[in-house]
Image: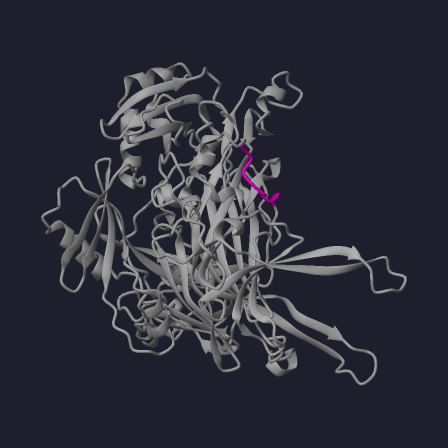
Amino acid sequence: MKTIKKTIIAAAISTLSLVSSHAVMAHGSSPDYIKIEDSLKNSGAVFAYDKSSKEVHITLNQAHACVKVGAMDAEVNGKRIQLDAPIKFEHGNLLVEKGFANDLFEGHVSQTISLSHAKHPLDPLSEAEITLTQQTVQASKYFRNNLRFTEIKLAEPDKSKVWAWSFGQDEDFLRLANFTILDGKHVIEGTVNLATKTVTRWQPIKDVHGMVIWDDFVAAQEIIEGSKEYADALKKRGIDNVKEVVATPLTVGFFDGEDGLKEDDRLLKIVSYLDIGDGNFWAHPIEGLVAVVNLETQSIEKIEDSGVIPVPMKPNPYDGRDQKKMAKVKPIAISEPEGSNYKMSGNIIHWQNWDFHLKLDPRVGPVLSTMTYNDQGTKRKIMYEGSLGGMIVPYGDPDIGWYFKAYLDSGDYGMGGLTSPLELGTDVPPNAKLLPATLADNSGAPYTIPNAIAIFERYAGPEYKHNEMLGSGAGNQSRARRELVVRWVSTIGNYDYMFDWVLLANGTIKLDVGASGIEAVKGVKTRTMHDATAKDDTRYGTLIDHNIVGTTHQHIYNFRLDLDVDGEKNSLVELNPAVEKNTAGGPRKSVMVVNQHTVKDEQEASQKFDPSTIRLMSNPNKENRMGNPVSYQIIPFAGGTHPIAKGALFSKDEWIYKRVSFMDKQIWVTNYKPEERFPEGTYPNRAKTDTGLKTFIEDNESIENKDNVLWITTGATHVARAEEWPMMPTEYVHAMLKPWNFFDQTPTLNLPSATEQK
């Protein structure tokens, strides 16, 4: 299913040059025209042309400009500015004078979060700190030329000290960098003291396989291209040029030798596709052919061939090149004429009553930390740290090219390093602020991903509404709901995963995950469901095109949420609505009640979620003014477009169950331990047992009134359909954390009405 074609981008984001070119026109010279896209390309601005009105709409950050073709002025956020030369439309192109963008958006240059100076104790390593880590390791007695880095990131300081610092106490923090290194197939962890420039820890980790790195993908392609045995297998399928074959190196899983593979070998399985030049090699699977590559020997260990299935050859572009008539879509202008409602200081973000810290982790993507809510002047703790914990995409087909496919995307590949840069106007709205992130490559050198994370506000319907027509009521009262969205996209081969952290002014936190990209498809003999082969060919999927089956699978996500609801000491509380017999008299035969239970320990907390029940992370030490303990409601399934994954669709004797437990329960609660980071364990690649959540709860510690971590599992079962081919419209799953007696009243009563905003 998956290939990773990552481009390491080492350039920082460009911004508009504000050097004026007015002098050229002042002396009467004719303007020097260029295409509008060339004028805007370095600014991050997006534009749209309305042919009917002959107006060009341009958006950059909070600035929106409207310029009429041929006019000598423009409107920017409602104000008129003079242009040196008009926009022209010639030969299908919009042309502007060279200084057009500078004149239009002076004062609106795109801002980014600076990651170069640590202002918060959880700030990610800067470019200089990553370089220092690399150089310190290279200068140490441990270094050898073949060592490859899989990760360099901040060694996080003590939680209690960070919370104390965020509430104004003076604390000293030592900047340390943790790293993970591959020495061939061996894994080494270590730490660098950035102040003393010394390696303070060098720890070989036994009996694990490290993360798959970019160098492995390059090696795998070279290995199959140099193999005569593989070339012979391709010729049986009518493929003479191996250079037209795209190798997708995949993790092999663990089957205790039942797959004929040695546990100790560093292996990848190669499933390939034919590139016919239509821009979509995923539509042309070379079915029934798998090469097992040994990364240590740089050779093919064996080839598995279940027989020739013709490669589907019908062109299947997804970029619109085959569309005879493109849709006419008029632009939508999003304007914030007085600027945005959020502020940034370094990596700290303030919006409405929310404050939190944001960074990008190389494995799990965005991490939101030290999250607090200002409740009428009182700063209250909500969450110390929240992030994706891990995810798995298991498939249900037993064929040789499919049975091993159960991708632990963040743990096997590192999703943060596979961040997909965002584009204004398509990936995010034009009012989004785009932020870069700096990570380390496999050599340990820093590189910058531009537009790695986006932050934006959006209208999200009415926050509340009531139209009172009786008595002396207040008449119609409605308020607009706004949301602050932190968006990040990671591309893992054929799938693009969109993660939104959404904050509401009323204290709600939404976790929205969208899957887009291209289906993982299987080549089959069947053209239509009327063929004799259709029943067998579609047993494990849906025929979505001639000779192409979309194989049934699941997308299961786990979020690690270190909730500290008004303090670190919390408990898991169950509220179960029930029907009971009416014993209070009257004509009613039954009554509705809610039975309450406080969960005692970690193993009891591990449970499937019933959406008809209520689960709370509650602080028994704090009450609202009515005497109810302050809490947050846990909602793993808050709607979705695909069927929910109530559990993994496997029998209990599957090897995957022995390796990954988080996918089958939606709620887990464990005592806070800083080393317990990942629900699938730190090293899931080829792991034979679960070293994650299953291990975390083996000691079955009490979770009553403890510093606990909540783990939410959500996801979908993906049954393919024709409307998702060749490009899949974004399909979402949703989870939610909602205040439950956390406040004393509706927390958004202070929102202004529409007339008050004017």
Q: Is residue 452 visible?
A: yes
13 inside magenta stretch: no
Query: Which part of the image, by quadrant, shows the N terminus?
Result: top left
- Residue 450: image quadrant is bottom left
Q: What colouring does the structure picture have?
A: one colour
Residue 283, percent across and down?
49, 31
Q: Quadrant of residue 102?
A: bottom left
Residue shown at 10%/51% (left/top)?
A: 139
Side of 496 relative to 329 (left or right): left
- What secondary structure prevails in the magenta region? loop
Q: Measuring 56% from the left and 43% from the top, which residue is drawn there?
A: 716
Q: Which residues are magenta?
A: 642-650
Task: Look at the picture and state if 169 lies above or below 490.
Answer: below
Q: Is residue 186 left or right of residue 458?
A: left
- Residue in front for this viewpoint, 336 or 389: 389
How far from the left and from the top, in percent, is residue 752? Answer: 61, 80
Query: Relative to 401, does residue 725 appear above or below in the rendering?
Result: below
Residue lying at the far front in this picture: please name it.
Answer: 583
Question: How many labels sit on residues?
Answer: 0
